[in-house]
Amino acid sequence: MSTATPVAHWPREIETWLDGHGKGAWIAVMVLGFIVFWPIGLALLAYMIWGKQMFKRSCRSKPVHKGRSSGNMAFDAYKADTLKRLEDEQAAFESFLERLRSAKDKAEFDAFMDENRRRREDAEAQPERTDG
């Protein structure tokens, strides 16, 4: 008896393999498809966009398994504390970045307003020229 996979199943196995390797693998295969024969690349692109709903169904980053127990209560408590600390640090860092962006935006806006005010004052300070 042969252990070879039936031909009808190899597209699904390729899809599963590509899903396991993420978006980069799909994009690389699509580019190779364009290089080898452009309709193959176009077909893969169409499948990636419409067939995979642009990776909503698969190829997602793997979620952290918070609820999965290792069987060791001390390790699970350590893991929960560490994940909570990392989530808090991530929230603090995102807040920090938002404050930086806001400060940068305000500084750029203030510089624009100062420059605009100086230009207006310079234009008003110059005497009117009359032809004659």
Image: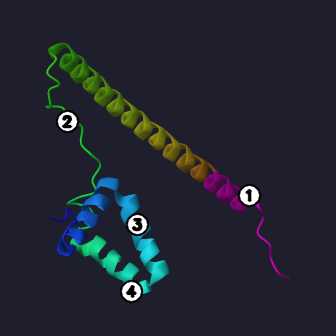
Q: Does residue 124 belong to the magenta stretch?
A: yes
Q: Residue drawn at (24%, 64%), measured in percent from left and top?
A: 13
Kind of residue at disc 1: Ala
Q: Residues within 10 Å of mark 3 (few under 14, many from 20)?
A: some
State the quadrant of the C terminus.
bottom right
Kindly state the secondary structure of the residue where label 3 is placed.
helix
Quarter the N terminus occupies? bottom left
Q: Residue at x 40, y 72 (%)?
A: 30
- Position in image of residue 8 (x %, y %): 18, 75
Mark 1 closeness class: few <14, some 14–19, many ≥20 residues within 10 Å = few
Residue at (62%, 49%) from the top-left corner? 114
Return the x and y of residue 131 as percentages of the image width and height: 82, 81
- Of residues 16 and 34, the one drawn nearer to the viewer in this rendering: 16
Q: In the figure, is residue 25 to the left or right of 106?
A: left
Name which of mark 3 and mark 1 comes first in the sequence: 3
Identify the element where label 2 is drawn.
Answer: loop
Residue marked by disc 2: 65
Distance Cα–Cα, label 3 vs label 4 = 15 Å
* Residue nearest the observer in this picture, 6 or 13: 6
Mark number displayed over residue 27 = 3
The disc labelled 2 sits on which kind of residue? His
Residue 110 picture location, percent across and down: 56, 46
Magenta part of the chain: 115-132
Q: Quadrant of residue 43?
A: bottom left
Of label 3 and label 4, which has the lower sequence position?
3
Q: Quadrant of residue 2?
A: bottom left
Residue identified by numbered label 1: 125
